[in-house]
Image (tube, coloured by chain):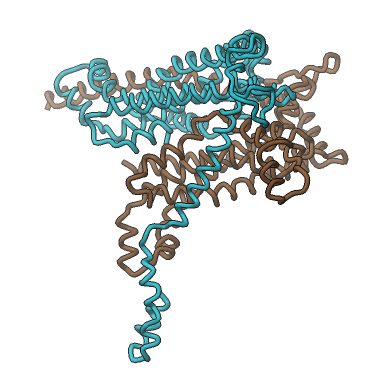
Chain colours: A cyan, B brown
Amino acid sequence: MSATAATSAKPAAGSVTARAPLPRLRRNPWGHPWFLEGFTWLYLIWSIVPIALAVLFSFNNGKSQSAWQGFSMRWYYADPVNSVLHDEQLRLAVIQTLRLSAYTTLIAVPLGVAFALGINRWRSYTSASFNFVMILSFVIPELIFGVAMFFMFTSLFTSVGLGTLAETLALVTWNVSWPAIIVQARLVTIGRQYEEASADLGSTQLQTMRRVMLPLLTPAIFASAVLVFSSVIDDFVIVDLLNSNAANTPMSVYIYSQQHGGNGGPALNALGTIMLVMSFVIATVGYFGYRFMTRGERSDRQEALSTIAGI
Amino acid sequence: MTARSKLARRRNAQREHNRIFWAALAAPGIIWLALLFIVPFYVVLAIAAGQLNQLYGTPIAVYNPLDWSATNLNAVWHITFGSGAFVGPIFLRTLWYTAVASIISLLIGYPAAYFVARFAGRRKAIFLVLLIAPFWISYMMRMLAWIDLLQTDGYVNKVLTTLHLVSHPVDWLGGQSYTVILGLVYGYIPYLILVLYAGLDRIDGSLLEAGRDLGLGRVRTFLRVTLPLSRQAILTGLLITVLPMLGDYFTNQLLSGTAGTAMIGNVIDGDLSTQAFFGQGAVLSLLLLLLLVIPMIYYVVATNRSSREAV
């Protein structure tokens, strides 16, 4: 800009100043930004290659997590003692993770969807403040929330105690904001005209809900179920604070406590790989399911991808 | 006149009926959040302001505010600022790690998100999948990946010694601050990138074209148009990484495990393992919450505003 300003300010100046901006033009400032692209690729390599190597080491035919000793499936099922299939602890961890994910999704999704519908339509002081509380539960650091849950179940609701029930109750509270936020966003984009049309045609509130609103909300409900399920698989802090014995210790906590206790080994990588595969299966199902459900709409791949990632 | 008032009355009755319907839908979620989100924080307060049973060393929760005592608060004050202060330095270290890790995350994340949002063109979906992938991989698995790489005989040391950059293998996992910061960056950057991407992708392309038409080059368009428009995304993205980092206690345990890299989360987590320290843990987590209340409310208000603007 300064170069242009300089030339226009002195139009009668010699040809040297008039030519000054030319080298910039030749460079085409709107060409492809190769530097940025290279940087992005470096970031992607940095973010993905370590994980790929960790997956690779789950197939290591040896105890090392750093020196490759050949391919084997021993850490998954071949080893009669230390494989995920035969080690009781590892197997329990897999089951507990799946159990918590299922329980949490089954409770949090209906609860959050009903909450979103009610809060969004019932305009009052109570609804506004609890919407605020709900979003607060979304941003509060997990450790602070986990500590509150820990004290809740160890000193007030002592009959609940620590264990699967406490884990489920806490995980539902922690994850209920997914359906609540996603469904509210969807309600905003749908607008009220379908509902009003249905009411004009004489259907009751419940009929409108069942025949009109729920079908329109299905993609959002589905996406939030996918997000809740996968975020419970990956959850660590809450379950770390609320587990009480080996039977209610999920995979993430097991990996942490073993690695931290100096018992690391490829079996942990195998467990991590199983978690990764679970998440990816769910993400894939979520993506294609969402695409299928929104097939009549003007939605594209990116929209489906961002919804499934919760952005 | 009477007909109209009758109609009005019927409409009012209908509206009242609707209100009850929506309130009933929201009720389970509201009760859930009240019982399992608001009450637990009161329990934390009751334990923080409660007493210690001298005989058994167990905490006594005091629910009546009139009987609250400052015993635990004084104890925390003593270990933070008093003569035997060990929490003070830990707290400063937590702030330092969090600040450095978030700034590095932003410096890496922004260019990558910017490239994908603006220049990826037809390959956008592929880039988006690669950006989202780490979001779907469990935190523990991602930490395992770096534990594998950073072992004394791991690949990082192998590469460095082969290239003669270091003469002896570096003890990366032996309590190094930079390893912990790397872990924090690696752990939380996917969330930051997704928020940045969403914010940058939302910027109207015609604004950038306007900048170009007015004679701005790429750098100036970025500085004058894109950067100011993405300020909101930067702030919320930083919050979404800073909040969990401040409550992190597992990254440093896995990647260093020494007292020299302890963060405030480790103190709170440690307090929960001994009943006599429950009170101090409660005080510390409330203080952390107090510190974070303003940024959290900012986040809630900002996301509310942007979702209203999206309508």
Extreme front residue here?
Answer: A70
The residue lying toward the viewer, choosing from A149 and B97, is B97
Q: Is residue B18 left or right of residue A64?
A: left
Q: Quadrant of residue B65?
A: top right
Q: Is there any visible trace of residue A294 in the rendered image? A: yes
Can you give x and y, in whole percent of width and height, for residue B70 in the image? 77, 31
Can you give x and y, in whole percent of width and height, for residue A33 in the image? 42, 57
Q: Which residue is depicted at the point 54% across and 45% down?
A: B238
Extreme right residue here?
Answer: B83
Q: Which residue is depicted at the point 31% across and 41% down?
A: B311
Asked if residue B65 is positioned above or below residue A103 in the image, the reply reads: below
Q: Which residue is depicted at the point 11% across and 24% down?
A: B3
Q: Quadrant of residue A208?
A: top left
Q: Is there any visible trace of residue B285 in the rendered image? A: no
The residue lying toward the viewer, choosing from B43 and A237, is A237
Asked if residue A147 is positioned above or below residue B229 in the image, the reply reads: above
Can you give x and y, in whole percent of width and height, for residue A76 in the image? 58, 16
Q: Is residue A277 left or right of residue B13?
A: right
Q: Which residue is depicted at the point 41% across and 78% down?
A: A3
Q: Is residue A106 left or right of residue A97?
A: left
Image quadrant occupied by the N terminus of chain B: top left
Can you give x and y, in whole percent of width and height, for residue A260 in the image? 72, 26
The residue lying toward the viewer, choosing from B209 and B137, is B137
User: Number of labelled discs?
Assistant: 0
